[in-house]
Amino acid sequence: MRSAVGRSDTAGPDLSRRPFAWTFTTPLYVGSSLNPINSSIIATALVPIATELHVSVGATAVLVSSLYLASAVAQPTAGRLGEVLGPRRILLSGIVLVLLGGLVGGLGQNLAMLTVARVLVGIGTSAAFPCAMLLIRRRAEEAGLDAPPGRVLGGIAIAGMATAAVGPPIGGLLVGAGGWRWAFLINIPVTAIAMAMAVRWLPRDPEPDLGHGGFRKVADRIDLPGILGFGSSMTALVVFLMGLPHLEWIALVVFVVTAVPTVVWELRKTAPFFDIRGLAANGALTRTYLRQALTLLGVYTVMYGMTQWMEAAHGFSTVTAGLLLLPMGAVSALLSHPLASRNLVRGPLLAAAVSMLLGTVGILLLTSHSPAIAIVLVSLVFGVTSAATTVGNQTALYLAAPPDQIGTASGLFRTFGYLGTITSAVIGSIVFRDGASDHGLHTLGFVLVAAGLAVLLLTVLDRRLMHRTPGREADSSENTDAPMNTAPVNTAPVNTAPVNTVTNPRKENPA
């Protein structure tokens, strides 16, 4: 697909010197933090919500699953819309939806209204990451950079992953001080700040070249039937997965009925929303998606599974269990930026796989009599996994995705991550169906061994990751000449050939 890329009309004369000034990156970081924080902040509000609305705590689980489901579908959709209509427009639209979700949730009187609010928040926050990646890629091309802006990607990694760990502590403070409604209302001041920064500092999008046809033209450019088919089949798949170990046959039937014609349609479409042929040809991108899903399965199994085990088997309170896992997020945040600034791919991915296996060994050795420090040490190892996989796979995504499809590719990257997260919750519910015991925790460990070995093989056997290509990278601190441990990317459409080279016609002086 050839989208109306265009160039921003607000780029200053010193763009080549400081393309990623803090005024450009800060709104992207703030926007990218909204989804992970909202994903985790609700955890501390579920019990108070159930009490006030007179529903079971189990019924409030829909507030968690609805955001995951909305995000899994909306991320690639927002990316595609950003490619066609402009990333700034879609990002601002997403911020408005988050603001609306905060209002609906803060004023909600029943579980249905709160669910609608979470869906609005899920859709709105989904615009941030793919639009940020699209804006970063276009800014790098405008500045004539042929290497990923590592420090900027590191900031996105911190905003997108590490902030999830601070959600429960923030939620505990908000809910404890002002009640559960602040788990929703907090979005109002945060989105107001994000909106002000985005309007003031992000470059305006060029007018999309849609010609005549209006909505019909836009629908054709974004492949609306493909989006609807993808959304329907993905929704059915997620509902089926979340229902396990009970088989939701209706969801499975809906998945098959919607997925089959969607695949047929996408294979026949010239510029499909979900480019199946292109994904099959672009093995580097496919492997990146799989690594991200499998590694996040491990990370979130620790976050959710160990939390349940600490409370049920070890006897820790909810607050204590959350605090014991807080260092995991801190390590992830501290490591993400220095790792990303070097534009390394293979090294961080190997570190993610090895640390995941080492952490799993630690899980297998834990018992309900283990001291708290042992639990913290295991979580710290998975903090390394979280940082390394986010940085390595995010840089691999930047390199492997076609430049004109970076928005959609980034959205699918997040979708695969959500599938890993949802699968981790499903595995935890199956393993702990009779209670969160030591035996159940060790069973989770064996599952993670298999996932860790798969990630290791996907990294070690990936020949694309063995190449080293020099390139020039710049960010707000004007860093240059960072190495890359991966093959660069092609600007050819995904439909034609595997993506394997970076080309930049504006480049004059190779680094």
Image (spheres, rainbow, N blue to C red):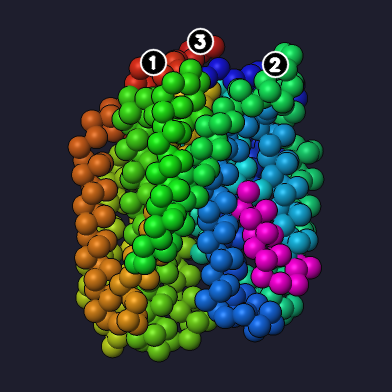
Crowd tier of the residue under label 1, counting other residues whose Cα lies within 10 Å: few below 14, some 14–19, many 20 or above: few
Residue 194 image position (x, y, % from top left): 73, 48
Residue 392 image position (x, y, % from top left): 38, 42
Quarter placement of the C terminus: top left
User: What's the distance in space between the residues labelled 1 and 2, CA to CA?
Assistant: 24 Å
Q: Hey, which quadrant is residue 400 in on the image? A: top left
Crowd tier of the residue under label 2, counting other residues whose Cα lies within 10 Å: few below 14, some 14–19, many 20 or above: few
At x 45%, y 68%, the residue is 327
At x 56%, y 66%, the residue is 62
Asked whether, in this view, residue 230 is left or right of residue 50, the answer is: left
User: What's the distance in space between the residues labelled 1 and 3, CA to CA?
Assistant: 20 Å
Crowd tier of the residue under label 3, counting other residues whose Cα lies within 10 Å: few below 14, some 14–19, many 20 or above: few
Instruction: Provide the secondary structure element on which disc 3 rests.
Output: loop
Q: Hey, which quadrant is residue 205 in on the image? A: top right
Check disc 1 and report the residue beneath it: 496
The answer to whether residue 386 of the structure is visible from this angle is no
Check disc 2 and report the residue beneath it: 209
2 or 3: tag closer to the N-terminus: 2
At x 34%, y 21%, the residue is 498
Asked whether, in this view, residue 35 is left or right of residue 147, the answer is: right
Check disc 3 and report the residue beneath it: 505
The answer to whether residue 234 of the structure is visible from this angle is yes
1 or 2: tag closer to the N-terminus: 2
Amino acid type for the residue under numbered disc 3:
Pro
Which portion, as a residue range, is magenta?
Answer: 106-123
Amino acid type for the residue under numbered disc 2:
Asp
